[in-house]
Amino acid sequence: MTTMPSTISPSRTTCASLLHELQIIWNEIGESDSERDKMLLQLEQECLDIYRKKVEKTRKYKADLHQSLVESEAEIANIVSALGEHASFSRGRGTLKEQISAIKPTLEELRSKKQERIKEFSEIQSQIVHICAEISGHGQSNSSSDPQVNECDLTVKKLGELKSHLQELQNEKIFRLQKVNSHVNTIRELAVVMSIDFSKTLDEVHPSLSDPSGHQSKNISNDTLARLTGVIHSLKQEKQQRLQKLKDLGRTLTDLWNLMDTPVDEQKRFGHVISLISSSVDEVSRQGCLALDVIEQTEIEVAQLNVLKSGKMKELVFKRQNELEQIYRGVHMDVDSDAARQILTNLIDSGSPICNVDLSDLLSSMDDQIVKAKEQAVSRKDILDKVEKWRYATDEENWLEEYERDENRYSAGRGAHKNLKRAEKARNLVGKIPAVVDNLIAKVKAWEAEKGIPFLYDKVPILSSLEEYIVLRQEREEERRKSREQKRLQEQLAAEQEALFGSRPTPKKPLGQNTSINTMAGTPLGRRMSTASGRPGISAGKERRESVRNIIPVNYVALPKDDSVSRGS
């Protein structure tokens, strides 16, 4: 039995080895040559078929590669055209796979760029559609469907046009949103002033305007803007009407308060209403100041005051009369209060049908009289001030005369130094009296010439009082002059007697005796102070000797001397 050849390793098997192995097998089997030729022909045919299929497959693969290369080149051209770029591409040389490998990175880059451009177009177009929907008032009804992007025109120019259009729409949206917010704020301010339901008012315009959460964007359509404008117009008219009504009520309240002399504390309850009288519509912004309940409360107060008005009219009339009399008395004007009160009493208590309106007219007339009296008081004030100064100066003049008659004015008693200071001031004031009187007379004459009536002071013409004072002052001056002349002669006589008879020392007083009863610092207390600066005929040396000499003649009687002589040195 023939031994089988060892199996050849598959990795080293070739067609020749397989054919050799097949011959060996045939020999062992005993196949005929015809069978062998037939089987070899069959094998050859099968090999040709396999090669043919492989060639066809490879040819098709080549065509696919070529088609892919062409399609890639066409896609590159389309993308470059759509993007509006001017880049050129060369296939290059080499095998198909090398050419495809060379073109693939460029194609991938252009595809990525195209997708990014499409995404950018899509986002911009979505925003445009959304803003257009908001402006038209359709809201987000079409926002669920993405807009179609024209992939044939993805150029930078087209993108810039869309961006410009988007910017215009965004500006329009911002402007409309600002306008809506401005209208909403205006409505809020008006609602606060008039205590109107703000949310309800906005909800009637559009629900999105009163959304407290803010999740829903505000409607900015033309219809919403028109409705907001109409609401603002109607609210402003309502505000104007309410303000005018409160102004009228406030004026009525003021008249009633003034008429009835209502206390300030009671008026404070409606101070916010009174403050509106002088306010314009734009100035009124306080919360609730034009609310309906404020108007209602003010109307109730006016009605109550009108009820009380008739009962207090008589009391008010006499209050006005008291005020008028006080003004007249304050400026020393003549007023017959008893006669005026009797006339008012007869007028009010008479049987004539006097109604409240007539009493109101009477009060108005008395108010006019009070105003005129105040004007007269103002016109008299300057003269009255000067009259008071003159009266004060005359009082000080009278006091100074009494003071200088007092022989004990230099004693060391309590308040002596104050009297000395007052006397010094009084002398200065008395010296100015003539100028004060002349000035006062000139002003009174000018006032009487302007008014055409005499200037009365407590029912007496002030010019008569001034003239009487001038005459009296002249008489006093004449008396003082005569007195000074008499004193001068007495002093001259005393000096002559002293020169003839001399003087002797006064006996000493017992220890402990008060020596300040009649004298103080060597000056007799009985001497009077005089406004004269000195007297002629008396030397300074003789005055000095009189101030220090304590010895007087036995037969000498001391007479009061003018203080200016004793203090001249």
Image (spheres, helix red, strand yellow):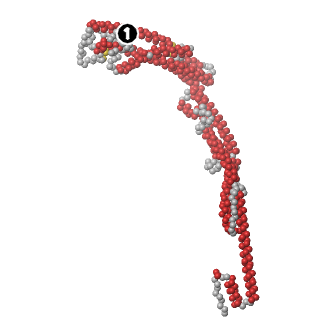
The quarter of the image holding the C terminus is top left
Q: Residue furthest bottom?
A: 1
Q: Quadrant of residue 282?
A: top right
In percent of width and height, residue 250 lies at: 60, 31
Q: Quadrant of the N terminus?
A: bottom right
Asked if one can make out residue 264 in the rendered structure from this viewpoint, the answer is yes
Percent of width and height locating residue 474: 44, 10
Rendered residue at 55%/33% (across/down) = 268
Q: How many labels sit on residues? A: 1
Query: Which kind of residue does numbered mark 1 sit on?
Result: Arg
User: On screen, 294 above or below 435?
Assistant: below
What residue is drawn where x is 73% and y is 67%? 67
Residue 219 is at least partly visible in this image = no
Label 1 Cα crowd, 10 Å radius (few <14 / some 14-19 / many 20+): some
Q: Quadrant of residue 552?
A: top left
Q: Position of residue 482 (x, y in %)?
A: 39, 8
Report the residue at 60% width, 37% height from top: 285
In the drawing, does residue 543 fall left or right of residue 276? left
Residue closest to the eye, 494 or 217: 494
Which residue is denoted by mark 1 in the rendering? 484
| Nearer to the camera, 358 or 243 | 243
Residue at the (32%, 19%) spot, across then down: 412
Is residue 226 placed above or below 267 in the rendered structure?
A: below
